[in-house]
Image: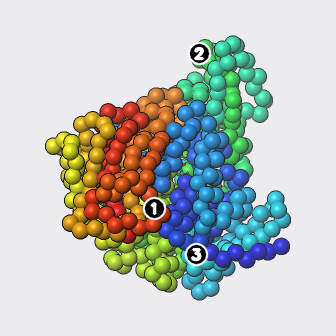
């Protein structure tokens, strides 16, 4: 049975890029269909693969660079609601967020197998759900391929590439002398647990047998987390050869565990036993689409910010040998650190030849070398949020083609939507003409010299230490009180009609924050509500309380009032935080 489904945007792939694209588009008013071939959302971050989400702050080594917007909302809520670090609860958080949006139709267990194309446009995505014996023809003016492998775009004929370019292709010093089809390999993770008593491991006979020499450059430690370097298959076709890659990775994972348990080299593993082993290879690389702009090594190393920057990255260029674990004499990864953040332009997130195709995630338009940084999941998430905003502007402006988004006026509109939705864009400030706070002045009884009340109106919602890039001004961009409770006021010269109030709190962007099975990385962060976040507050209009909030755990809160109020003095009264002894606020906005 075929169902025809109509939407404004069809997103294929429910990894972090697809989830964020769908949420962003839906929250900006589009009817969205999200097609995901698995039973859970999250892609490589889901309980099926269990990779932790890293990004531009490089595990906290670049303080202040942590991504905000939808990914921050997810991380903060996960840390508060899931202190036990359950990946199943993380899956369910993503599910809850997506299904809570009335504008999203979520099709789980549904494979996109191609698209119907007319001229240079996709008119419908073709999808099947075997478990219910259904097929779907999803018709939409715009599509976003966030599937990693890029099945929709590939079937539709979108220009793409696979493998490593030659040094000459883009003049990249980190590229190969000559091009080849090799990619980063795939991995299967396992997790293990200490049972407090000896736990033998009887190894099956079909596994790989490793010796100490095989781990010359690799260290089998962190039994609770698994070995990300259990990587193989980058010399094969990671799409068509996936079954063979899976089999070899299972042999490798069990072989590593056999070495740990039975070689005598790891006596500390005596009480440990495998708890979970992945059934799906986590795939690092396959197709990369080509947009009007292909991001390169020079863009990353130069910290380039584009006029149409809609997202950013900052993870090192993180290259791996395609042979993975079989490249015994090579390090499992080579990191080339970046001096600061780099921008991701809108033009790297849409197709150069298919008029209505956006993409985000590991299949974005980047050289192999640049992809080695853009591929990490917090970067994929902010690209996804950007694509959702781009689609919203494309639909709402009546654009025929994705290329319209690089028009300066539309690009600026996308940027302002993203900032309003708490994304961060290097060097770009709030200039939203509808924001009534732009016409107010900010006052506080208590303020520090370095953190004045006026900072909540300066258009930047995080501290910008110079380590973030040449555009960073070193400012705190934050009002901070000296004690609690504390009041912050927005004052207008005449009453304004207020219907919506936006508040952005501090959430500790100097620390890393992610769900991880690694005890080492987990030890560097705080699970639970973040101490800087304001938990209890009130909004007061000219002396009358509009609303009270208790137990907030989020950085960005949007309060839509039941009806507009006319106000000359709006007060944010902060009663308590989750641990900090003072109030910290980055921004206040108001809308009619
Ligand atoms: C072993 C490993 C270790 C890594 N380490 C890290 C790390 O530590 N931190 C980090 O941030 N990143 C890490 N990465 C990189 C990161 O996981 C990926 O680059 C990232 O997941 C890409 O996100 P995505 O949303 O583009 O794709 P994915 O996470 O792959 O999500 C794509 C989703 O689309 C679905 N899909 C695919 N095809 C279809 C289709 N035809 N129809 C419907 N749905 C489809 C897939 O099932 C999947 O759920 C690692 C990757 C691997 C494999």
Q: What residue would you read off at disc 3?
A: 8
Reading the image, the residue beneath label 2 is 268
SS at badge 2:
helix
The CA span between labels 1 and 3 is 25 Å
Q: Earlier in the sequence, mark 2 or mark 3?
A: 3
Q: Is residue 28 visible?
A: yes
Answer left or right for 62 relative to 227.
Answer: left
Give the quadrant of the C terminus. bottom left
Q: Camera-side residue: 334 or 455?
A: 455
Taking 579 as reference, is 423 above or below it? Answer: below
Q: Residue at coordinates 23% horizontally, 55% vertically from top-left?
A: 442
Q: Which mark is residue 560?
A: 1
Q: Quadrant of the N terminus?
A: bottom right
Residue toward you, 315 or 472: 472
Task: Give the residue at x 56% y 39%.
Answer: 81
Q: Which of the pair 342/545 is nearer the observer?
A: 545
């Amino acid at each position: 049975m075929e169902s025809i489904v109509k939407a404004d945007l069809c997103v294929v792939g429910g990894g972090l890029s697809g989830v964020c694209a769908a949420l962003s588009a839906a929250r900006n008013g589009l009817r969205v269909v999200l097609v995901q071939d698995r039973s859970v959302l999250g892609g490589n971050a889901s309980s099926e693969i269990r990779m932790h989400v890293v990004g531009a702050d490089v595990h906290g080594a670049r303080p202040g660079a942590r991504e905000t917007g939808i990914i921050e909302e997810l991380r903060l809520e996960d840390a508060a609601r899931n202190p036990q670090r359950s990946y199943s609860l993380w899956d369910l958080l993503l599910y809850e967020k997506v299904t809570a949006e009335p504008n999203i139709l979520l099709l789980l267990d549904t494979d996109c197998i191609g698209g119907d194309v007319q001229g240079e446009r996709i008119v419908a995505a073709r999808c099947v759900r075997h478990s219910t014996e259904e097929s779907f023809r999803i018709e939409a003016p715009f599509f976003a391929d966030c599937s990693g492998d890029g099945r929709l775009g590939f079937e539709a004929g979108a220009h793409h590439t696979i493998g490593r370019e030659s040094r000459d292709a883009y003049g990249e010093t980190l590229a190969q002398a000559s091009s080849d089809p090799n990619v980063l390999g795939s991995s299967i993770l396992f997790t293990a647990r200490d049972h407090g008593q000896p736990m033998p491991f009887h190894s099956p006979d079909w596994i790989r047998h490793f010796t100490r020499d095989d781990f010359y450059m690799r260290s089998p430690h962190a039994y609770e987390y698994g070995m990300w370097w259990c990587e193989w298959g980058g010399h094969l076709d990671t799409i068509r050869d996936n079954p063979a890659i899976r089999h070899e990775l299972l042999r490798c994972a069990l072989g590593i565990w056999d070495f740990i348990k039975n070689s005598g080299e790891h006596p500390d593993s005596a009480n440990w036993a495998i708890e979970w082993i992945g059934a799906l290879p986590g795939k690092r690389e396959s197709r990369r689409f080509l947009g009007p702009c292909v991001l390169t090594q020079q863009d990353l190393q130069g910290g380039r910010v584009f006029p149409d920057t809609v997202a950013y990255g900052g993870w090192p260029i993180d290259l791996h040998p395609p042979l993975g674990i079989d490249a015994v004499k090579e390090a499992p990864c080579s990191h080339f650190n970046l001096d600061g953040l780099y921008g991701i332009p809108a033009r790297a997130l849409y197709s150069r030849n298919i008029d209505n195709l956006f993409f985000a995630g590991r299949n974005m338009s980047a050289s192999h070398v640049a992809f080695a940084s853009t591929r990490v999941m917090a970067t994929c998430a902010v690209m996804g949020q950007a694509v959702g905003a781009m689609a919203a502007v494309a639909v709402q402006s009546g654009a025929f083609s994705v290329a319209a988004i690089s028009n300066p006026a539309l690009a600026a509109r996308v940027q302002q939507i993203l900032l309003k939705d708490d994304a961060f864009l290097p060097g770009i400030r709030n200039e939203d003409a509808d924001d009534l706070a732009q016409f107010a002045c900010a006052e506080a009884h208590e303020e520090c010299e370095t953190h004045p009340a006026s900072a909540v109106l300066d258009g930047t919602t995080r501290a910008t230490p110079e380590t973030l890039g040449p555009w960073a001004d070193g400012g705190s961009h934050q009002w901070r009180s000296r004690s609690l409770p504390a009041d912050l006021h927005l004052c207008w010269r005449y009453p304004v009609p207020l219907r919506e109030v936006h508040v952005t709190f501090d959430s500790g962007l100097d620390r890393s924050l992610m769900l991880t099975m690694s005890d080492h990385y987990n030890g560097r962060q705080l699970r639970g509500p973040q101490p800087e976040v304001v938990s209890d507050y009130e909004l007061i209009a000219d002396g009358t309380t509009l609303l009270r909030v208790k137990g907030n755990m989020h950085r960005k809160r949007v309060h839509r009032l039941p009806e507009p109020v006319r106000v000359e003095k709006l007060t944010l009264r902060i009663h308590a935080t989750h641990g900090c002894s003072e109030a910290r606020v980055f921004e206040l906005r108001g809308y009619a």
